[in-house]
Image (spheres, rainbow, N blue to C red):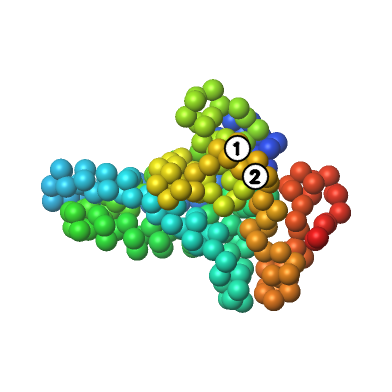
Amino acid sequence: MSLYSRESHYLNKMGVKELNRAFFTHYTVIVYLTLATISAFAAVYYSNDILRQGLAVLAATISFPLLWYITHRWILHGQWLYKFKYTAALWKRIHYDHHQDPYHLEVLFGALRTTIPPIALIMMPLGYAIDGWGGAAASFSTTCLVTCFNEYCHCIQHLNFKPKQQWLKHIKEQHLMHHFQDENGNYGITNYFWDKLFNTYYVRKARKKKSPTVHNLGYTPEIAHAYPWVAELSGGVDNRSPRERRTNKPINNN
């Protein structure tokens, strides 16, 4: 695969080596790493105090899981973006398509236009409050790197691969339940602290019944009748699991 490639890849057909090659040559990862490097140099140049610089890095690292939890639970799984014509395509791209096909690598990655602005607008003021422009640059650089780590672990969670590390095995199991058992919980990717705090963390035995909307996030045929824009962009409402779609089983909208 060539550098900056935009070809499609499917994680259920890949191993770790194939993932590494696809991941580190994907244009979104290249952009994150480039911005992180430039920002790191800016952080050093504008730094006022090494201790406060470290605090800006720590603040960004600690804040990221909470930012992700809020975004994932109340925005990506919220029931409002698809209700407006001008945000329906955004919701479809940033999360609906991922639950429709969790193995599609290019859909798994957040679109840069939806990730970079929030990172800058939220994390840079946090860093600026700690160490001025040096802190803002350090916070932004750190968040870009943490985002890459988060995305890589997210890929591993959907990869045809069984981790040996207990921590990685655990987060993979919890995330797969979010996709294939019940989407209303386990919103974290690498950190489930906020799920536990807000009582959205669960294990398989706690929710034995599969959610009927785990693959469509509640965007049912009835909802599509009132708010048709996602369905129009998707060619209808598909309630089938990713495996059923791959075997060409008929669509069941009941």
Q: Residues within 10 Å of mark 2 (few under 14, many from 20)?
A: many
Residue 134 sits above or below residue 201 on the image = below
For residue 181, the mark is 2
Residue 243 position, x and y percent, is 76, 43
Kindly identify the residue that appears in the image at 52 percent across and 32 percent down: 170
Front-lying residue, 102 or 225? 225
Residue 2 sits above or below residue 213 on the image = above
Res 244 visible? yes
Res 27 visible? no
Residue 143 position, x and y percent, is 36, 49
The first of marks 2 and 1 along the sequence is 2
Q: Tell me the amino acid under the disc marked 2.
A: Gln
**In what element is the residue under mark 2?**
loop
Q: Residues within 10 Å of mark 1 (few under 14, many from 20)?
A: some
Separation of residues labelled 2 and 1 (CA atoms):
8 Å
Kindly identify the residue that appears in the image at 80 percent across and 61 percent down: 253
Disc 2 and disc 1 in contact, CB within 8 angstroms: yes
Front-lying residue, 165 or 147? 165
For residue 204, the mark is 1
Residue 53 position, x and y percent, is 20, 46
Does residue 71 appear to the left or right of 86 in the view shown? left
**In what element is the residue under mark 1?**
helix
Does residue 126 appear to the left or right of 47 in the view shown? right
Dividing the image into 4 quarters, which one contains the C terminus? Answer: bottom right
Dividing the image into 4 quarters, which one contains the N terminus? Answer: top right
Kindly identify the residue that appears in the image at 27 percent across and 53 percent down: 137
Does residue 142 appear to the left or right of 164 in the view shown? left
Residue 245 position, x and y percent, is 79, 49
Q: Tell me the amino acid under the disc marked 1.
A: Arg
